[in-house]
Image: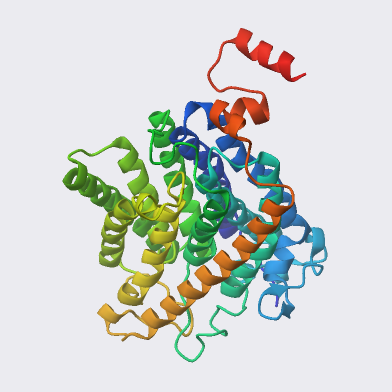
Amino acid sequence: MDFTLDTGNTAFMLLAASLVLLMTPGLAFFYGGMVRGKSVLNMMMMSFGAMGLVGLIWVLYGYSATFGGSDIGGFFADPTQWFGLQGATDADSLMALSGVPFLVGAGFQLTFAVITVALISGAVADRMKFNSWLVFGGIWVTVVYIPMAHMVWGGGNLSGSGITESISTPIDFAGGTVVHINAGTAGLALALLLGIRKGFGKEPMRPHNLPFVMLGAALLWFGWFGFNAGSEFGADGVAGRAWLNTTVATCVAMLAWLATEKLRDGHATSLGAASGVVAGLVAITPAAAAVDSYGAIAIGAIAGVLCALAVGLKYRFGYDDSLDVVGVHLVGGLVGTLLIGLFATADNSTFLPDGAKEGLFYGGGIDQLLTQAIVAVAAVVFSFTATFVIGYILKKTIGIRVSEEAEVGGIDLAVHAESAYETLGAGSRVVTEVK
């Protein structure tokens, strides 16, 4: 394939990649504000740690194993083909048809891998060893994320040529399956292995800094435009559709979450507003370019209500998903992925991949809905099984949970020898004691 550089699309994708990278520090603020003050630094460090670790892995073999030219059993590509991102030409770029160079495409996909691992950390807040988190993250991105991304985006088992080939091509425009269902399911598996926090369900564990949560939600919303619009790989009408749908679905989801809170609890909260924003962003992600404005409004409304209700399931079923990764990302990802089967349309600057069909409400029958359901179930089963095995092995070898003393006294001091809110003198004493 001949490659012709498109400087406009390349500039657009560099901006999109930068926006998506900003999402992980934004997530650090979002999660950091939701935990108690004694563990905010550890919570934020889990996101920053994921950036460093996954970024390195992606450059060395992650991109090659996901998007390389040689398929291995439908789960991997050849990790050695472009090891260290060497040996490729711009004609090999995932975005070659858009005139975007190979390295820019690889960098854009790096940011997706980083945020997916970081999302899981919200389910294990206050109680997971930091070194075990890093070991888990390195193994998980290799054994779970890379195969999932290859299966959905790289031509593997969950793509149009995979298990749904005889029905229709699955639609996951920007990562509903690869990122959100994947991370939400992994969070559930890891939370079950870790067990509940001390005092879970018995004592209040309120967010210590709601302005941090609001700031994090704002940064996530801003960065998400790179996430969704950037997934078009070019500055065109489809990217514009993705941008607009991302905005309107998020607006509606926030309102729906607040309305649900008001009816259920008698008041609407800032935490609910921030959570509704993220729920809307998650749900519209797979459908961003596949639905019209009415579909985006419907997806946002349904996600806002269902995610607001789903965050309470952990108390009913007894699993401690600390910061509602399951309730927001798993449920929101499932909502967005499935509703494509109802609202997908090829009109008004939308985009459906070859072999995909319109949704039930737009005259396409149930084929696309069935396809979306099969892919969603397969993703949940694969992610949960693989994550549970990884976590179980780590639990039985290096251990994954901090000591009770560290958990009760504060994981920031115990693990990092720091505290987010202390005088200089107190900080000096802590460092001296650690030395």
- Furthest residue toward bottom: 166
Q: In the rendered view, would you say 4 is above or below 235? A: below
Viewport quadrant of the N terminus: bottom right
Q: Is residue 262 left or right of residue 277?
A: left
Q: Residue 343: x and y, percent? A: 31, 73
Residue sitting nearer the eye, 202 or 72: 202
Residue at left 30%, top 51%?
A: 308
Count of number-bearing discs:
0
Q: In the rendered view, would you say 344 is above or below 227? A: below
Q: Is residue 84 left or right of residue 34?
A: right
Residue 104 in view here: no
Residue sitting nearer the eye, 285 or 265: 265
Residue 394 in view here: yes
Residue at left 38%, top 62%?
A: 241
Q: Residue 67: x and y, percent? A: 68, 70
Viewport quadrant of the C terminus: top right
Q: Is residue 160 left or right of residue 281?
A: right
Residue 285 in which image quadrant:
bottom left
Residue sitting nearer the eye, 405 or 256: 405
Q: How is the image coloured?
A: rainbow
Residue 8 in which image quadrant:
bottom right
Q: In the rendered view, would you say 183 is above or below 398? A: below
Residue at left 29%, top 48%?
A: 254
- Furthest residue toward top: 425
Q: Residue 75: x and y, percent? A: 66, 75
Q: Residue 256: x and y, percent? A: 24, 51
